[in-house]
Structure formats: structure tokens, C-alpha cells
Image (spheres, rainbow, N blue to C red):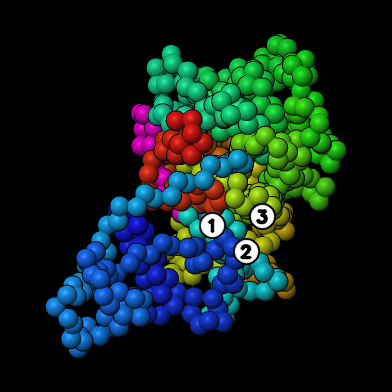
Amino acid sequence: MRKWKKTITAAFLALTLTGVSGCSLFGSDETKPAESEFAIWTYPVETTAQASTTPNATEGTTPESKTNESTSASTPEPTNASEAPTTQVDPTLPPEETTAEPAEPKKPKYIFLFIGDGMGVGHIQAASYYKAAEGGGKKYDPSKTSYAGTYLNFEQFPVVGSVTNYNSDSFITDSAAAITAITTGFKTSTDAIGVDPSGTERLETITEKVKKLLGYKVGVVSNANINHATPAGYYGHQTDRTMYYELGQDMLASGFDYFGGGSIRQPTGADGTLPDLYDLAAAQGYRVFRDNDAALASLTGDMGKVLITSQQRAEGDAMKLRVDAGKGDADLAAYVEGGLKVLGDEKGFFYAIEGGLIDWASHENDLGAVVREVLDLEKAVGVAMDFYNKHPDETLILVTADHETGGLGLGYSNMGYDLYLNGLKKQNLSYWQYMRMVALEYRPNKTSWDTVLWEMRSHFGLTVSGTYQAGDDPKLVLKEEEVMQLNAAYLASMQDARATMGTAAYESYGAYEPLAFTVTTLLAKKCGVKFSTIYHTAQPIPLYAIGAGAEEFSGVYDNTQIAMKLEKLLGID
């Protein structure tokens, strides 16, 4: 049965890639993507025999005679009475099922699990199109340029799944409940991490199991806080995701081998009176490198357990968004690479990596930051691919998300059938940094409307009619109604009147700073992209897989199945 299903799947993929009319999805041969060892169009698929002879046949059974029989069904050769008749197969029917046992999937020794927090298909596609538009600094023209060469690296993985992600009390999950399902195989309620919906039962995670049962090393990296909801889902067991200090204690108690990325949130507790978690980590045998990107270069496998956090200080003391980062600021890939030095390749490992700032930028509807964060995740996946290429038979890489954030839609009514991702190139400031500029500079200094327009052009490329200058992008000129919308947000920001603006204003700005939020959403719309919410959505999320056991992750399934499939592959189910 499984071989038949693979054959049907292969036929479906062939139709998908060639099109029903027989035309190639990628156009002429010159525009086809280059083949690679992990491209979906080169993935091997098993085939089954289409004809057979009866077991009593004693003559005419040589390969040559079988070929003649199968190719001359319209004018069969005369046969002797002792010859058994050849069975003809109706090509419209599926192949007969075979009794051969399917090959056992390979047990991975090295597992990478990447979570793009909040990353839906729209986020991936927007980043992919932006990458195409950015190439060589040239304007992307779909009619003249092959898009195929701009797939993100993980989009080319041979196995793709679609994953549902509701939690025990809502169709729309939060990160805490979602990561609990992914790491334990059990649903829980919103805000809960590593416990059942009642909060009374501790749920063991896949990372805790591989550490205890297989002796694998475990690493956890996030460019958000290392004790934020998603990274905490590998070691934490608390009823509320905001229990940062308690989650930090769980982190140290796990005994995992490598923690890296954004700083520990509330390291001395919410009121600042508890023992410092960094000091506790050192007391428990961790080599601690606090606020020290530079120490990544000196990490080695003989250091024992390592905790290293970045000195970058952005929203929530997380690492900087890439659109705000300087040349010397380490990125997610640097922390992934540093961790590989600690984890080594002897015992086997489970490496959990989160691109957490995709979610934060999506909540803020900041498209320019979103696409750069997805590309930052892609770069980190590239580090794992380098490792995979050295250990292809023992490595499994999974790239997925916990949920989708923002309802990111590639298409906006006022743009018709046009996407213009080139429009993001001039953005050099995130919503978060611009919000700080409004709060710390514009409002107290009563910055003029004209100055705001000038700086908006400088940081986001948006201009208004009458101020257009050489070098400005004509597609980013605001229309009259957009200028009125922007001016209303400016006036609201100057008064800091969000608390008294009422329901209509909340529809426009949500919980965010009016001027900064309006600028980023207007830029997104000028690019042909519209967000439907500032929260999460119930959209299923994609999963991409390559390596040992990857085939187990194809199809449509629930996020609880990720842990179950991993446990089965590792023999710990």
C-alpha cells in the first residue's frame, strides 16, 4: 500500500510541476532551477512493476520474451498448450499492492529543529520574492528573470508537510501551547508551557527524553530571550509563559549543554530581588558568557556546558532585528555555528533553534523587518546544511513554525495584481526603533509635521506629492487619502492619546504607537501586502524536512505528531 501511495504521490508531483496542459511550471529549460542534492524535483520515488506472469510458466520467461510479451499485446505470438497465458494489466488501474515490507526509516543521530516563530507561507513567500527583487540591486521583472533561482534553501527540501496548530482551548494558539504540542505530543491551554491544561501534570519533552534515554547533547538557541515561550518549550514546565524566572530555573535544571542568543528575561525576577540566574548558572557548572557576542569565536567542545547571550539590547532585551543591526552584531547563524562547536559530532545531539523575531515584527505589521528576519533564519539553516553535507546519512533537519502571525496576505486591493517588494529596500529602521524615536524625540520636542515627513523618507522611502526628489521611488509616493491617514496618526502620537482614542483608533493602530504603526503598514500596502491582524491566526503552517527519516514528515497532520514522529524515529516512543 505504501508503494502505491508513493507512486500516486509521484504522479501528482509530476502533474504539479509540469502543469495539466503539459507546460513546465518553470518555463523553458533555461529557466528551470538548478538541480541540487536537496531539491524537491530530484527526490527519488519508488516505482512498482506493472505486469507479472503466473508462477507455473516454464517457458518464454526470459527477460527478452517478457519484453516481447509486454510490447506486442495487440498481436500476440502463438503459444504452446504448455505455456501459461500472460496476464495483461489495465494501465488505468493502480498497481497491485505488494507484500514487501517498507524499508525502515533511518534513525537520525543529529537533529536540527528550526522554528520560525509566527512564520506562515506568506512570510516565506514574501522573503523569497524580496530576495529575488534584491538580487544584484536590480528591479525584479518576473517576465525576464527566473524566479526559481530564488527559493529559500529550506524551500528546496525534498519533503513538505502541512501542520495544524490549534490548542486545547482555542483554534488560534499562542506560542506556549504550540511549542508544548510540538515538543511533548500533547495539547495544552493558552500560556501553559510543558504542563497539561489543568496545570497539574508535567509533560516530558522530546529534548528531555533524548538527553536521558539516548545520551544526546541538547542545544537551544533563540534570537528572542532564551527563556521566552518557544525556547522554554524544550525544558520548561510552568502554568504561565510570563513566569520568566521560574522558566529560567527550569532551563538550568535541564542540564542541557548549550544555551545561546538573546538575554535571559528578568534574571533576578519580576521585582529584581531574586538570585541572579546568570550566577546560578555558573554555580551549576555552566561556562557563562554574558552580553558577549565576541566569545562565540572562542567556544570549544571541551568547555562543558555553555550559556552565552548577546550584548545586543532591543525590544524586551532580545537581540536586534536585522534591519536595525550593525555590522558587528552577531546574527542567529553565528549563535547556531557557535553551538555546533560545543555540541560536537560524537554523541549525537538535538539542536533547537528559534527565529523568534519573525513573530515580533509580524505583530507590529512591519513587513520590512519580517522579510529580513526570515532571511536571517534561512542563513541559520545554511549552517545546518553545511553540517548535513558532512553527515548526510545521520542528520535530520526540520524547518517549521509554531503558528502564523499577522495574517500576512500577498495582495492588496489598491495594488491590483501587483507586488512590489523592491519598495522595502529603503527601509533601514524597524517599527520598534521608529516607535522609540516618536516617544523619545518627536513627542517631547513637539517635532513638526514637515520634519516627520523628511525623516520618514530617509528611513522608509515614503514620500508625499510636492516633495518628490531625484532618487525617490515613484511607487512610494503617498496618495492624498494616505497622507490624511498619516497626519491623523501624527496628531494622535503627538498627544499620546492612545488610551482615550476609543474603538475606532484601536482598529487603526491596535496596541501600537499610531505614527510608527501607520508608517510600516502604509509601506507594506505600497508593496502590495496587507496584514489582517496584529495577533496570531489559525492558518496551518508548513514543515520542510531533509535527511535521515525526513519522509516521515510529509502530508497533513497535527503539530502533536511532530514529537510522536521524532520519538518513533529515535526508538523512544
Q: Which residue appears at 65% of the width and 42% of the height?
A: 432
Label 3 and label 1: CA atoms lie apart by 13 Å
Answer few, some or many: residues within 10 Å of disc 2's Cα (few below 14, many 20 plus, some between 14 and 19).
Answer: many
Of callouts 2 and 1, the N-terminal one: 2
CB atoms of marks 2 and 1 within 8 Å: no
| Left or right: 344 as drawn, with respect to 21 | right
* Mark 3 burial class by Cα count in 10 Å: few <14, some 14-19, many 20+: few
193, above or below 142, in the image: above
Q: Can you give x and y, in whole percent of width and height, for residue 105 in the image?
A: 47, 46
Secondary structure found at label 3: helix
Amino acid bearing label 1: Phe
Identify the residue under disc 3. Answer: 389
The amino acid marked with disc number 3 is Asn
Q: Which residues are magenta?
A: 160-174
Q: Amino acid at mark 2?
A: Lys
Name the residue nearer the viewer: 36 or 117. Answer: 36
Q: Which residue is mark 1?
A: 157
Instruction: Provide the residue designation for mark 2.
Output: 131
